[in-house]
Image (cartoon, rainbow, N blue to C red):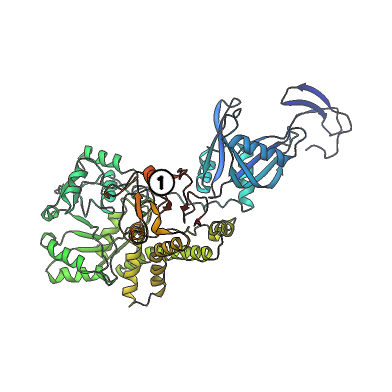
Amino acid sequence: MTSSQPPSQPSRVCFTTPWMEVVAVPSGNGSADEHFVVKTKDYVSIVALLPDGRVLLVGQYRPAVNAETIETPAGHVEEGQTPEEAARQELLEETGYQAGSMELLGVLRPDTGRLGNRHWAFLATDLEKLADPAEHEVTKPLAVTPAELREMTLDGRLSHAQSLAAVHLATTRGRIVMPAPQPPVAKPLRRFEPQTGTAHDVCVIGGCGHVGLPLALVMARAGMRVLVHDINEAALTEVAAGRMPFTEEGAEPLLREALAAGRLTFSADPAAFRAVPNLIVTIGTPVDEFLNADTGVIRRWIEGFAPHVSDEQLIMLRSTLYPGTTDWLARHLARLGKRPRIAFCPERIVQGKAIHELPLLPQIVSGTTPEAADSAADFWSLIAPQIVRMAPIEAEFAKLFCNAYRYIQFATANQFFMITADAGVDFGRVMRGLKAHYPRMRDFPSAGFAAGPCLLKDTMQLAAFAQNRFTLGHAAMQINEGLALWLVGELARTHDLKRKTVGLLGMAFKADIDDTRASLSYKLKKTLAFNCRDVLTADPYVTDDPELLPTDEVVERSDLLVLCVPHSIWRGLDTRGKPLIDIWGFLAATPSLPRS
Protein backbone atom coordinates (compact mmCIF):
# COMPACT_ATOMS: atom_id res chain seq x y z
CA MET A 1 0.00 0.00 0.00
CA THR A 2 1.39 3.44 -0.88
CA SER A 3 1.60 6.31 1.58
CA SER A 4 -1.14 8.92 1.72
CA GLN A 5 1.55 11.57 2.14
CA PRO A 6 1.76 14.07 -0.75
CA PRO A 7 4.97 13.90 -2.83
CA SER A 8 7.76 16.30 -1.90
CA GLN A 9 9.52 16.30 -5.28
CA PRO A 10 8.20 18.18 -8.34
CA SER A 11 6.69 16.33 -11.27
CA ARG A 12 8.13 16.33 -14.79
CA VAL A 13 6.45 16.04 -18.18
CA CYS A 14 7.65 12.99 -20.10
CA PHE A 15 5.48 12.97 -23.19
CA THR A 16 2.91 15.30 -24.75
CA THR A 17 0.16 14.91 -27.40
CA PRO A 18 -2.75 17.19 -28.36
CA TRP A 19 -5.00 14.98 -26.20
CA MET A 20 -2.91 14.32 -23.12
CA GLU A 21 0.48 14.35 -21.49
CA VAL A 22 2.35 11.71 -19.48
CA VAL A 23 3.77 13.09 -16.26
CA ALA A 24 6.24 11.46 -13.87
CA VAL A 25 5.47 12.20 -10.23
CA PRO A 26 7.15 10.97 -7.05
CA SER A 27 5.45 7.83 -5.76
CA GLY A 28 5.05 9.39 -2.32
CA ASN A 29 6.23 6.34 -0.39
CA GLY A 30 9.53 7.94 0.70
CA SER A 31 11.54 6.41 -2.14
CA ALA A 32 12.91 7.97 -5.26
CA ASP A 33 10.53 5.91 -7.43
CA GLU A 34 8.41 7.75 -9.96
CA HIS A 35 4.81 7.09 -10.82
CA PHE A 36 3.60 7.82 -14.33
CA VAL A 37 0.29 9.66 -14.60
CA VAL A 38 -1.79 10.54 -17.67
CA LYS A 39 -2.95 14.13 -17.52
CA THR A 40 -5.93 14.91 -19.74
CA LYS A 41 -8.94 17.18 -19.79
CA ASP A 42 -11.93 16.68 -17.55
CA TYR A 43 -14.75 14.71 -19.16
CA VAL A 44 -18.54 15.12 -19.12
CA SER A 45 -21.24 12.57 -19.89
CA ILE A 46 -24.92 13.34 -20.09
CA VAL A 47 -27.87 11.12 -19.23
CA ALA A 48 -30.54 12.83 -21.37
CA LEU A 49 -34.20 12.06 -20.63
CA LEU A 50 -36.82 12.71 -23.30
CA PRO A 51 -40.30 13.85 -22.16
CA ASP A 52 -41.68 10.32 -22.67
CA GLY A 53 -39.09 8.83 -20.29
CA ARG A 54 -36.75 7.38 -22.91
CA VAL A 55 -33.01 7.86 -22.58
CA LEU A 56 -31.06 9.47 -25.41
CA LEU A 57 -27.89 7.60 -26.43
CA VAL A 58 -25.47 7.97 -29.35
CA GLY A 59 -23.73 5.42 -31.53
CA GLN A 60 -20.34 6.22 -33.04
CA TYR A 61 -17.22 4.58 -34.41
CA ARG A 62 -14.31 4.45 -31.93
CA PRO A 63 -10.89 3.83 -33.54
CA ALA A 64 -9.35 2.76 -30.21
CA VAL A 65 -11.51 -0.38 -30.15
CA ASN A 66 -12.13 -0.52 -33.93
CA ALA A 67 -15.87 -0.79 -33.40
CA GLU A 68 -19.06 1.23 -33.28
CA THR A 69 -20.08 1.73 -29.67
CA ILE A 70 -23.21 2.99 -27.92
CA GLU A 71 -22.64 5.61 -25.24
CA THR A 72 -24.25 8.55 -23.52
CA PRO A 73 -23.49 11.92 -25.16
CA ALA A 74 -20.09 12.98 -23.85
CA GLY A 75 -16.96 15.04 -24.41
CA HIS A 76 -14.12 17.00 -22.87
CA VAL A 77 -14.31 20.18 -20.85
CA GLU A 78 -12.39 22.71 -22.89
CA GLU A 79 -10.32 25.51 -21.41
CA GLY A 80 -12.51 28.35 -20.23
CA GLN A 81 -15.62 26.15 -19.98
CA THR A 82 -17.48 25.05 -16.91
CA PRO A 83 -18.47 21.37 -16.85
CA GLU A 84 -22.14 22.30 -17.28
CA GLU A 85 -21.36 24.46 -20.30
CA ALA A 86 -19.42 21.56 -21.81
CA ALA A 87 -22.31 19.18 -21.13
CA ARG A 88 -24.81 21.48 -22.81
CA GLN A 89 -22.55 21.94 -25.82
CA GLU A 90 -21.84 18.21 -26.26
CA LEU A 91 -25.53 17.30 -25.95
CA LEU A 92 -26.51 19.85 -28.59
CA GLU A 93 -23.69 18.92 -30.98
CA GLU A 94 -24.12 15.14 -30.73
CA THR A 95 -27.93 14.91 -30.63
CA GLY A 96 -29.38 18.27 -31.68
CA TYR A 97 -31.23 18.58 -28.35
CA GLN A 98 -31.08 21.50 -25.95
CA ALA A 99 -31.60 20.85 -22.25
CA GLY A 100 -33.95 23.05 -20.25
CA SER A 101 -32.47 21.66 -17.05
CA MET A 102 -28.98 20.26 -16.41
CA GLU A 103 -28.49 18.57 -13.03
CA LEU A 104 -25.12 17.41 -11.71
CA LEU A 105 -25.36 13.74 -10.77
CA GLY A 106 -21.84 13.40 -9.43
CA VAL A 107 -18.11 13.89 -9.98
CA LEU A 108 -16.16 10.66 -10.51
CA ARG A 109 -12.51 9.65 -10.86
CA PRO A 110 -12.14 7.43 -13.95
CA ASP A 111 -8.88 5.73 -12.86
CA THR A 112 -7.14 6.93 -9.67
CA GLY A 113 -4.07 4.82 -10.45
CA ARG A 114 -3.24 6.40 -13.79
CA LEU A 115 -5.58 9.21 -14.75
CA GLY A 116 -5.67 12.60 -13.11
CA ASN A 117 -8.85 13.96 -14.66
CA ARG A 118 -12.43 14.00 -13.39
CA HIS A 119 -15.66 12.69 -14.90
CA TRP A 120 -18.65 15.01 -14.47
CA ALA A 121 -21.98 13.18 -14.88
CA PHE A 122 -25.07 15.27 -15.65
CA LEU A 123 -28.80 14.62 -16.04
CA ALA A 124 -30.43 16.60 -18.86
CA THR A 125 -34.21 17.07 -18.83
CA ASP A 126 -36.85 19.29 -20.49
CA LEU A 127 -35.22 18.51 -23.82
CA GLU A 128 -36.09 20.47 -26.94
CA LYS A 129 -35.02 19.37 -30.42
CA LEU A 130 -33.34 22.31 -32.13
CA ALA A 131 -31.47 20.70 -35.00
CA ASP A 132 -29.81 17.57 -36.30
CA PRO A 133 -26.40 16.64 -34.85
CA ALA A 134 -23.61 19.03 -35.84
CA GLU A 135 -22.06 18.34 -39.24
CA HIS A 136 -18.63 17.57 -37.78
CA GLU A 137 -20.12 14.91 -35.50
CA VAL A 138 -20.36 11.28 -36.60
CA THR A 139 -22.83 10.26 -33.91
CA LYS A 140 -26.12 8.46 -34.48
CA PRO A 141 -28.69 9.39 -31.78
CA LEU A 142 -31.07 6.70 -30.57
CA ALA A 143 -33.70 6.71 -27.83
CA VAL A 144 -34.35 3.70 -25.58
CA THR A 145 -36.81 2.95 -22.80
CA PRO A 146 -35.52 2.22 -19.28
CA ALA A 147 -36.32 -1.45 -19.87
CA GLU A 148 -34.29 -1.45 -23.09
CA LEU A 149 -31.48 0.41 -21.33
CA ARG A 150 -31.36 -2.29 -18.67
CA GLU A 151 -31.14 -5.01 -21.31
CA MET A 152 -28.36 -3.13 -23.11
CA THR A 153 -26.29 -3.02 -19.92
CA LEU A 154 -26.80 -6.75 -19.34
CA ASP A 155 -26.08 -7.96 -22.87
CA GLY A 156 -23.03 -5.72 -23.37
CA ARG A 157 -24.35 -3.36 -26.02
CA LEU A 158 -23.78 -0.52 -23.55
CA SER A 159 -20.27 -1.27 -22.31
CA HIS A 160 -18.69 2.18 -22.05
CA ALA A 161 -17.68 2.40 -18.40
CA GLN A 162 -18.20 6.15 -17.99
CA SER A 163 -21.65 5.94 -19.61
CA LEU A 164 -22.57 3.08 -17.30
CA ALA A 165 -21.36 5.08 -14.30
CA ALA A 166 -23.54 8.05 -15.27
CA VAL A 167 -26.56 5.79 -15.83
CA HIS A 168 -25.93 4.15 -12.45
CA LEU A 169 -25.88 7.55 -10.72
CA ALA A 170 -29.12 8.56 -12.45
CA THR A 171 -30.74 5.27 -11.41
CA THR A 172 -29.44 5.44 -7.83
CA ARG A 173 -30.79 8.97 -7.47
CA GLY A 174 -34.19 7.85 -8.78
CA ARG A 175 -33.97 9.89 -11.99
CA ILE A 176 -34.31 6.75 -14.10
CA VAL A 177 -36.70 4.06 -12.87
CA MET A 178 -35.42 0.72 -14.11
CA PRO A 179 -37.89 -2.18 -14.32
CA ALA A 180 -37.51 -4.79 -11.62
CA PRO A 181 -35.32 -7.71 -12.67
CA GLN A 182 -37.41 -10.57 -13.99
CA PRO A 183 -36.58 -14.23 -13.47
CA PRO A 184 -35.51 -16.04 -16.63
CA VAL A 185 -38.44 -17.18 -18.74
CA ALA A 186 -38.73 -20.94 -18.63
CA LYS A 187 -38.67 -22.81 -21.89
CA PRO A 188 -41.57 -25.09 -22.81
CA LEU A 189 -41.38 -28.21 -20.68
CA ARG A 190 -41.00 -30.44 -23.69
CA ARG A 191 -41.34 -30.54 -27.43
CA PHE A 192 -44.79 -31.68 -28.41
CA GLU A 193 -45.05 -35.32 -29.32
CA PRO A 194 -47.93 -35.94 -31.75
CA GLN A 195 -50.45 -38.52 -30.68
CA THR A 196 -50.74 -41.60 -32.81
CA GLY A 197 -54.01 -42.51 -34.46
CA THR A 198 -55.18 -38.92 -35.00
CA ALA A 199 -54.74 -36.56 -37.92
CA HIS A 200 -54.61 -33.49 -35.66
CA ASP A 201 -53.37 -32.76 -32.15
CA VAL A 202 -55.59 -29.76 -31.48
CA CYS A 203 -58.48 -27.90 -33.08
CA VAL A 204 -58.93 -24.16 -32.61
CA ILE A 205 -62.61 -23.29 -32.97
CA GLY A 206 -62.90 -19.71 -34.16
CA GLY A 207 -59.40 -20.24 -35.47
CA CYS A 208 -59.32 -17.34 -37.94
CA GLY A 209 -60.10 -14.71 -35.32
CA HIS A 210 -57.89 -12.36 -33.34
CA VAL A 211 -57.63 -14.81 -30.43
CA GLY A 212 -57.63 -18.12 -32.28
CA LEU A 213 -55.29 -17.59 -35.22
CA PRO A 214 -52.19 -16.32 -33.34
CA LEU A 215 -52.66 -19.19 -30.91
CA ALA A 216 -52.88 -21.70 -33.75
CA LEU A 217 -49.63 -20.36 -35.20
CA VAL A 218 -47.77 -20.54 -31.89
CA MET A 219 -48.96 -24.11 -31.35
CA ALA A 220 -47.88 -25.04 -34.88
CA ARG A 221 -44.47 -23.55 -34.11
CA ALA A 222 -44.34 -25.88 -31.07
CA GLY A 223 -44.76 -28.83 -33.43
CA MET A 224 -48.51 -29.47 -33.14
CA ARG A 225 -50.74 -30.44 -36.03
CA VAL A 226 -53.50 -27.84 -35.84
CA LEU A 227 -56.98 -27.92 -37.31
CA VAL A 228 -58.24 -24.37 -37.82
CA HIS A 229 -62.04 -24.38 -37.66
CA ASP A 230 -64.09 -21.30 -38.49
CA ILE A 231 -67.51 -20.60 -39.98
CA ASN A 232 -66.00 -17.70 -41.97
CA GLU A 233 -65.04 -19.57 -45.12
CA ALA A 234 -63.59 -16.46 -46.79
CA ALA A 235 -61.17 -16.04 -43.88
CA LEU A 236 -60.27 -19.74 -44.05
CA THR A 237 -59.42 -19.39 -47.74
CA GLU A 238 -57.30 -16.29 -47.11
CA VAL A 239 -55.32 -17.87 -44.27
CA ALA A 240 -54.84 -21.12 -46.22
CA ALA A 241 -53.32 -19.00 -48.99
CA GLY A 242 -50.76 -17.62 -46.55
CA ARG A 243 -52.35 -14.21 -45.91
CA MET A 244 -53.18 -12.85 -42.47
CA PRO A 245 -56.72 -11.39 -42.34
CA PHE A 246 -55.68 -8.77 -39.75
CA THR A 247 -52.60 -7.08 -38.32
CA GLU A 248 -50.59 -9.24 -35.90
CA GLU A 249 -46.89 -8.65 -35.26
CA GLY A 250 -44.72 -11.55 -36.38
CA ALA A 251 -47.63 -13.67 -37.61
CA GLU A 252 -47.01 -13.85 -41.35
CA PRO A 253 -43.61 -15.61 -41.16
CA LEU A 254 -45.10 -18.15 -38.74
CA LEU A 255 -48.06 -18.70 -41.04
CA ARG A 256 -45.80 -19.37 -44.01
CA GLU A 257 -43.64 -21.69 -41.91
CA ALA A 258 -46.64 -23.65 -40.60
CA LEU A 259 -48.15 -24.04 -44.07
CA ALA A 260 -44.84 -25.18 -45.53
CA ALA A 261 -44.48 -27.76 -42.74
CA GLY A 262 -48.03 -29.03 -43.28
CA ARG A 263 -49.04 -28.33 -39.68
CA LEU A 264 -52.22 -26.36 -40.48
CA THR A 265 -55.46 -27.77 -41.84
CA PHE A 266 -58.63 -25.75 -42.42
CA SER A 267 -62.30 -26.65 -42.22
CA ALA A 268 -65.72 -25.07 -41.71
CA ASP A 269 -67.29 -28.49 -41.05
CA PRO A 270 -67.85 -29.25 -37.33
CA ALA A 271 -67.57 -32.95 -38.07
CA ALA A 272 -63.89 -32.37 -38.86
CA PHE A 273 -62.92 -32.09 -35.18
CA ARG A 274 -64.78 -35.21 -34.11
CA ALA A 275 -61.57 -37.22 -33.56
CA VAL A 276 -59.32 -34.34 -32.41
CA PRO A 277 -58.24 -34.92 -28.77
CA ASN A 278 -57.95 -31.25 -27.75
CA LEU A 279 -60.46 -28.52 -28.62
CA ILE A 280 -59.83 -24.83 -27.90
CA VAL A 281 -62.97 -22.69 -28.13
CA THR A 282 -62.41 -18.98 -28.78
CA ILE A 283 -66.10 -18.10 -28.81
CA GLY A 284 -66.76 -15.55 -26.09
CA THR A 285 -69.78 -14.02 -24.41
CA PRO A 286 -71.03 -10.71 -25.84
CA VAL A 287 -73.42 -8.28 -24.18
CA ASP A 288 -76.90 -7.63 -25.49
CA GLU A 289 -78.79 -4.37 -26.03
CA PHE A 290 -79.39 -4.14 -22.28
CA LEU A 291 -75.65 -4.50 -21.54
CA ASN A 292 -76.28 -7.92 -20.01
CA ALA A 293 -74.27 -11.02 -20.84
CA ASP A 294 -75.66 -12.90 -23.84
CA THR A 295 -74.97 -16.44 -22.65
CA GLY A 296 -77.15 -17.78 -25.43
CA VAL A 297 -74.18 -17.62 -27.79
CA ILE A 298 -72.38 -20.41 -25.92
CA ARG A 299 -75.62 -22.38 -25.52
CA ARG A 300 -76.39 -22.23 -29.23
CA TRP A 301 -72.82 -23.17 -30.11
CA ILE A 302 -72.64 -26.23 -27.90
CA GLU A 303 -76.06 -27.50 -28.91
CA GLY A 304 -75.02 -27.32 -32.56
CA PHE A 305 -71.62 -28.91 -31.98
CA ALA A 306 -72.48 -31.41 -29.23
CA PRO A 307 -73.13 -34.29 -31.69
CA HIS A 308 -69.45 -34.11 -32.70
CA VAL A 309 -68.04 -34.05 -29.13
CA SER A 310 -66.85 -37.24 -27.46
CA ASP A 311 -66.08 -38.12 -23.83
CA GLU A 312 -62.39 -38.58 -24.69
CA GLN A 313 -61.90 -34.96 -25.69
CA LEU A 314 -60.57 -32.03 -23.67
CA ILE A 315 -62.56 -28.82 -24.32
CA MET A 316 -60.67 -25.68 -23.30
CA LEU A 317 -62.67 -22.43 -23.30
CA ARG A 318 -60.45 -19.45 -24.09
CA SER A 319 -62.49 -16.22 -24.38
CA THR A 320 -64.37 -14.20 -21.78
CA LEU A 321 -67.15 -16.08 -20.01
CA TYR A 322 -69.91 -14.90 -17.70
CA PRO A 323 -69.11 -16.21 -14.18
CA GLY A 324 -70.42 -19.74 -13.80
CA THR A 325 -70.46 -20.59 -17.53
CA THR A 326 -67.73 -23.26 -17.39
CA ASP A 327 -69.54 -25.30 -14.74
CA TRP A 328 -72.87 -24.73 -16.50
CA LEU A 329 -71.41 -26.09 -19.75
CA ALA A 330 -70.28 -29.29 -18.04
CA ARG A 331 -73.75 -29.81 -16.56
CA HIS A 332 -75.47 -29.01 -19.85
CA LEU A 333 -73.34 -31.46 -21.81
CA ALA A 334 -74.00 -34.12 -19.17
CA ARG A 335 -77.75 -33.63 -19.74
CA LEU A 336 -77.07 -34.26 -23.43
CA GLY A 337 -75.26 -37.48 -22.55
CA LYS A 338 -71.75 -36.04 -23.14
CA ARG A 339 -69.00 -35.97 -20.49
CA PRO A 340 -65.82 -34.54 -22.00
CA ARG A 341 -63.24 -32.83 -19.79
CA ILE A 342 -64.08 -29.11 -19.56
CA ALA A 343 -61.54 -26.40 -18.75
CA PHE A 344 -61.43 -22.62 -18.80
CA CYS A 345 -58.00 -21.22 -19.74
CA PRO A 346 -58.45 -17.49 -20.44
CA GLU A 347 -56.29 -15.46 -22.80
CA ARG A 348 -54.81 -12.22 -21.47
CA ILE A 349 -52.71 -11.02 -24.39
CA VAL A 350 -52.58 -7.54 -25.94
CA GLN A 351 -54.18 -7.60 -29.37
CA GLY A 352 -51.49 -7.40 -32.01
CA LYS A 353 -48.80 -8.75 -29.63
CA ALA A 354 -50.02 -12.34 -29.17
CA ILE A 355 -47.12 -14.03 -30.96
CA HIS A 356 -44.69 -12.31 -28.62
CA GLU A 357 -46.71 -12.63 -25.40
CA LEU A 358 -48.06 -16.19 -25.53
CA PRO A 359 -44.69 -17.81 -24.65
CA LEU A 360 -43.99 -15.19 -21.96
CA LEU A 361 -47.17 -14.82 -19.92
CA PRO A 362 -48.33 -17.21 -17.19
CA GLN A 363 -51.40 -19.20 -18.14
CA ILE A 364 -54.40 -19.45 -15.82
CA VAL A 365 -55.85 -22.96 -15.93
CA SER A 366 -59.06 -24.28 -14.39
CA GLY A 367 -61.18 -27.38 -14.86
CA THR A 368 -64.55 -28.70 -13.80
CA THR A 369 -62.84 -31.87 -12.56
CA PRO A 370 -59.30 -32.52 -11.29
CA GLU A 371 -58.69 -34.62 -14.40
CA ALA A 372 -59.76 -31.75 -16.67
CA ALA A 373 -57.54 -29.28 -14.81
CA ASP A 374 -54.55 -31.62 -14.94
CA SER A 375 -55.02 -32.27 -18.66
CA ALA A 376 -55.32 -28.56 -19.41
CA ALA A 377 -52.24 -27.75 -17.31
CA ASP A 378 -50.27 -30.41 -19.14
CA PHE A 379 -51.38 -29.02 -22.50
CA TRP A 380 -50.62 -25.35 -21.79
CA SER A 381 -47.24 -26.16 -20.27
CA LEU A 382 -46.12 -26.79 -23.85
CA ILE A 383 -46.45 -23.06 -24.54
CA ALA A 384 -46.64 -21.04 -21.32
CA PRO A 385 -43.69 -20.54 -18.94
CA GLN A 386 -45.86 -20.93 -15.84
CA ILE A 387 -49.24 -22.44 -14.95
CA VAL A 388 -51.54 -20.73 -12.42
CA ARG A 389 -54.32 -23.01 -11.16
CA MET A 390 -57.73 -21.73 -10.16
CA ALA A 391 -61.29 -22.94 -9.82
CA PRO A 392 -63.40 -22.20 -12.93
CA ILE A 393 -65.36 -19.32 -11.41
CA GLU A 394 -62.15 -17.83 -10.00
CA ALA A 395 -60.60 -17.90 -13.47
CA GLU A 396 -63.73 -16.36 -14.98
CA PHE A 397 -63.58 -13.50 -12.48
CA ALA A 398 -59.84 -13.07 -13.06
CA LYS A 399 -60.40 -12.59 -16.78
CA LEU A 400 -63.15 -10.02 -16.20
CA PHE A 401 -61.16 -8.20 -13.53
CA CYS A 402 -58.17 -7.76 -15.86
CA ASN A 403 -60.19 -5.92 -18.48
CA ALA A 404 -62.42 -4.01 -16.06
CA TYR A 405 -59.43 -2.75 -14.11
CA ARG A 406 -57.73 -1.51 -17.27
CA TYR A 407 -60.95 0.17 -18.37
CA ILE A 408 -61.19 1.95 -15.01
CA GLN A 409 -57.56 3.08 -15.30
CA PHE A 410 -58.32 4.69 -18.66
CA ALA A 411 -61.43 6.32 -17.23
CA THR A 412 -59.42 7.85 -14.41
CA ALA A 413 -56.96 9.39 -16.86
CA ASN A 414 -59.78 10.65 -19.07
CA GLN A 415 -61.60 12.18 -16.11
CA PHE A 416 -58.42 13.95 -15.00
CA PHE A 417 -57.90 15.21 -18.55
CA MET A 418 -61.37 16.73 -18.76
CA ILE A 419 -61.03 18.31 -15.31
CA THR A 420 -57.76 20.02 -16.19
CA ALA A 421 -59.00 21.06 -19.64
CA ASP A 422 -62.07 22.69 -18.11
CA ALA A 423 -59.75 24.54 -15.72
CA GLY A 424 -57.49 25.72 -18.54
CA VAL A 425 -54.57 23.69 -17.18
CA ASP A 426 -52.08 21.77 -19.32
CA PHE A 427 -52.81 18.08 -18.54
CA GLY A 428 -49.53 16.98 -20.13
CA ARG A 429 -47.46 19.13 -17.79
CA VAL A 430 -49.39 17.83 -14.79
CA MET A 431 -48.79 14.23 -15.84
CA ARG A 432 -45.10 14.72 -16.55
CA GLY A 433 -44.66 16.42 -13.21
CA LEU A 434 -46.44 13.81 -11.12
CA LYS A 435 -44.62 10.95 -12.87
CA ALA A 436 -41.16 12.52 -12.69
CA HIS A 437 -38.89 10.25 -10.61
CA TYR A 438 -42.00 8.81 -8.91
CA PRO A 439 -42.28 5.09 -9.63
CA ARG A 440 -45.75 4.65 -8.12
CA MET A 441 -47.25 6.56 -11.06
CA ARG A 442 -45.12 5.23 -13.90
CA ASP A 443 -47.87 2.93 -15.22
CA PHE A 444 -50.60 5.57 -15.18
CA PRO A 445 -52.00 5.78 -18.74
CA SER A 446 -52.42 8.87 -20.88
CA ALA A 447 -55.80 10.26 -21.81
CA GLY A 448 -57.38 8.86 -24.96
CA PHE A 449 -60.18 6.78 -26.39
CA ALA A 450 -60.64 3.53 -24.43
CA ALA A 451 -62.44 1.18 -26.77
CA GLY A 452 -62.30 -2.18 -28.46
CA PRO A 453 -64.24 -5.42 -28.29
CA CYS A 454 -63.35 -6.39 -24.70
CA LEU A 455 -62.90 -3.55 -22.20
CA LEU A 456 -66.44 -2.14 -22.15
CA LYS A 457 -68.05 -5.52 -22.79
CA ASP A 458 -66.26 -7.28 -19.95
CA THR A 459 -66.86 -4.39 -17.56
CA MET A 460 -70.57 -4.55 -18.30
CA GLN A 461 -70.65 -8.33 -17.83
CA LEU A 462 -69.17 -7.84 -14.39
CA ALA A 463 -71.73 -5.12 -13.67
CA ALA A 464 -74.57 -7.39 -14.78
CA PHE A 465 -73.31 -10.20 -12.56
CA ALA A 466 -73.20 -7.75 -9.64
CA GLN A 467 -76.85 -6.82 -10.32
CA ASN A 468 -75.79 -3.37 -11.56
CA ARG A 469 -74.05 -2.58 -8.27
CA PHE A 470 -70.64 -2.26 -9.90
CA THR A 471 -70.85 1.53 -9.70
CA LEU A 472 -67.16 1.99 -10.50
CA GLY A 473 -67.62 0.12 -13.76
CA HIS A 474 -70.66 2.15 -14.76
CA ALA A 475 -68.84 5.38 -13.92
CA ALA A 476 -65.92 4.26 -16.10
CA MET A 477 -68.31 3.58 -18.97
CA GLN A 478 -69.87 7.04 -18.65
CA ILE A 479 -66.45 8.70 -18.66
CA ASN A 480 -64.85 6.70 -21.47
CA GLU A 481 -67.91 6.64 -23.71
CA GLY A 482 -68.61 10.27 -22.86
CA LEU A 483 -65.17 11.53 -23.85
CA ALA A 484 -66.12 11.68 -27.53
CA LEU A 485 -69.26 13.65 -26.72
CA TRP A 486 -67.31 15.97 -24.43
CA LEU A 487 -64.88 16.67 -27.27
CA VAL A 488 -67.73 17.62 -29.60
CA GLY A 489 -69.16 19.95 -26.95
CA GLU A 490 -65.77 21.55 -26.38
CA LEU A 491 -65.27 22.10 -30.09
CA ALA A 492 -68.78 23.49 -30.53
CA ARG A 493 -68.10 25.93 -27.70
CA THR A 494 -64.93 27.28 -29.27
CA HIS A 495 -65.52 26.88 -33.02
CA ASP A 496 -68.39 27.50 -35.44
CA LEU A 497 -68.63 23.83 -36.40
CA LYS A 498 -71.39 24.25 -38.96
CA ARG A 499 -68.83 26.10 -41.09
CA LYS A 500 -66.00 23.64 -40.44
CA THR A 501 -64.74 20.44 -42.03
CA VAL A 502 -63.27 18.21 -39.34
CA GLY A 503 -60.68 15.55 -40.16
CA LEU A 504 -60.44 12.46 -37.97
CA LEU A 505 -57.06 10.74 -37.94
CA GLY A 506 -57.36 7.11 -36.91
CA MET A 507 -60.46 4.89 -37.00
CA ALA A 508 -59.13 1.64 -35.47
CA PHE A 509 -59.88 1.14 -31.79
CA LYS A 510 -56.21 1.50 -30.81
CA ALA A 511 -52.82 2.30 -32.28
CA ASP A 512 -51.04 0.25 -34.96
CA ILE A 513 -53.80 -2.27 -35.64
CA ASP A 514 -56.55 -2.53 -38.25
CA ASP A 515 -59.45 -3.56 -35.98
CA THR A 516 -62.34 -1.07 -35.81
CA ARG A 517 -64.57 -3.06 -33.47
CA ALA A 518 -66.24 -0.75 -30.91
CA SER A 519 -63.95 2.10 -31.98
CA LEU A 520 -64.95 5.42 -30.42
CA SER A 521 -63.69 7.17 -33.54
CA TYR A 522 -66.93 6.17 -35.24
CA LYS A 523 -68.99 7.49 -32.35
CA LEU A 524 -67.15 10.79 -32.69
CA LYS A 525 -67.67 10.75 -36.46
CA LYS A 526 -71.42 10.17 -36.11
CA THR A 527 -71.83 12.95 -33.58
CA LEU A 528 -69.72 15.44 -35.54
CA ALA A 529 -71.62 14.67 -38.75
CA PHE A 530 -74.71 16.21 -37.17
CA ASN A 531 -72.84 19.35 -36.12
CA CYS A 532 -70.21 20.02 -38.82
CA ARG A 533 -70.17 20.99 -42.46
CA ASP A 534 -68.32 17.75 -43.23
CA VAL A 535 -66.31 15.00 -41.53
CA LEU A 536 -63.37 13.32 -43.27
CA THR A 537 -61.57 10.21 -42.00
CA ALA A 538 -58.18 8.58 -42.54
CA ASP A 539 -56.51 5.43 -41.25
CA PRO A 540 -53.66 3.74 -43.14
CA TYR A 541 -54.20 0.44 -41.28
CA VAL A 542 -57.95 -0.04 -41.77
CA THR A 543 -58.96 -1.69 -45.04
CA ASP A 544 -62.69 -2.35 -44.65
CA ASP A 545 -64.04 1.23 -44.59
CA PRO A 546 -64.72 2.60 -48.11
CA GLU A 547 -65.13 6.16 -46.79
CA LEU A 548 -61.51 6.46 -45.67
CA LEU A 549 -59.29 8.92 -47.51
CA PRO A 550 -55.50 9.31 -47.73
CA THR A 551 -54.03 11.08 -44.73
CA ASP A 552 -52.60 13.94 -46.79
CA GLU A 553 -55.98 14.61 -48.38
CA VAL A 554 -57.75 14.72 -45.01
CA VAL A 555 -55.13 17.11 -43.63
CA GLU A 556 -55.38 19.33 -46.72
CA ARG A 557 -59.19 19.53 -46.85
CA SER A 558 -59.91 19.88 -43.12
CA ASP A 559 -60.28 23.06 -41.08
CA LEU A 560 -59.79 21.17 -37.80
CA LEU A 561 -58.00 17.89 -37.12
CA VAL A 562 -58.64 15.39 -34.33
CA LEU A 563 -56.05 12.71 -33.59
CA CYS A 564 -58.29 9.82 -32.59
CA VAL A 565 -55.62 7.08 -32.67
CA PRO A 566 -51.86 7.64 -32.20
CA HIS A 567 -50.57 5.34 -34.93
CA SER A 568 -46.77 5.25 -34.70
CA ILE A 569 -46.34 5.95 -38.43
CA TRP A 570 -47.83 9.40 -37.82
CA ARG A 571 -45.02 10.45 -35.50
CA GLY A 572 -43.86 13.79 -36.89
CA LEU A 573 -46.89 14.14 -39.22
CA ASP A 574 -47.06 17.51 -40.95
CA THR A 575 -50.49 18.93 -40.09
CA ARG A 576 -49.80 22.04 -42.20
CA GLY A 577 -50.59 24.42 -39.37
CA LYS A 578 -54.18 23.19 -39.01
CA PRO A 579 -55.64 23.37 -35.48
CA LEU A 580 -55.08 19.94 -33.91
CA ILE A 581 -57.02 18.29 -31.11
CA ASP A 582 -54.58 15.75 -29.66
CA ILE A 583 -55.74 14.42 -26.28
CA TRP A 584 -52.97 11.80 -26.40
CA GLY A 585 -50.18 14.38 -26.47
CA PHE A 586 -48.72 12.40 -29.38
CA LEU A 587 -48.31 14.93 -32.20
CA ALA A 588 -48.69 18.10 -30.19
CA ALA A 589 -46.18 17.02 -27.48
CA THR A 590 -48.87 17.69 -24.90
CA PRO A 591 -52.64 17.02 -24.83
CA SER A 592 -54.22 19.93 -26.67
CA LEU A 593 -57.55 21.57 -27.34
CA PRO A 594 -56.93 24.47 -29.73
CA ARG A 595 -59.05 27.56 -29.24
CA SER A 596 -60.52 29.72 -31.97
Residue located beneath label 1 in the image: 555
Residue at far front of view: 499
Percent from the top left, x then y, of residue 199?
A: 15, 47
* 148 left or right of 370 in image: right
Question: Would residue 358 be visible to someone looking at this image?
Answer: no
Numbered marks: total = 1
Residue 463 in which image quadrant: bottom left
Does 21 sit left or right of 166 as displayed?
A: right
In what quadrant of the picture does the N terminus appear?
top right
Residue at image coords 60%, 55%: 437
- Residue 92 is situated, as x and y percent measured from the top left of the image, at 62, 38
**Disc 1 packing (10 Å; few <14; some 14–19; many ≥20):** many
| Residue type marked 1 | Val
Q: Quadrant of residue 45?
A: top right
507 to the left or right of 204: right
Left or right: 580 in relation to 10: left
Q: Nearer the viewer, residue 145 or 447?
A: 447
| Residue pictured at 40% horizontal, 55% vertical | 500
User: Looking at this view, is 375 or 530 the one in front?
Assistant: 530
| Whether residue 365 is situated above or below residue 514 in the rendered picture | below
**Secondary-structure class at tag 1:** helix
Give above or below for 499 relative to 12. Answer: below
For this rendering, which residue is in front, 595 or 297?
Answer: 595
Q: Quick check: 475 above or below 313?
A: below
Give residue 71's position: percent from left, percent from top: 58, 37
User: In x, y percent, where is residue 38?
Assistant: 74, 29
Q: Can I make out residue 433 in this image?
A: yes
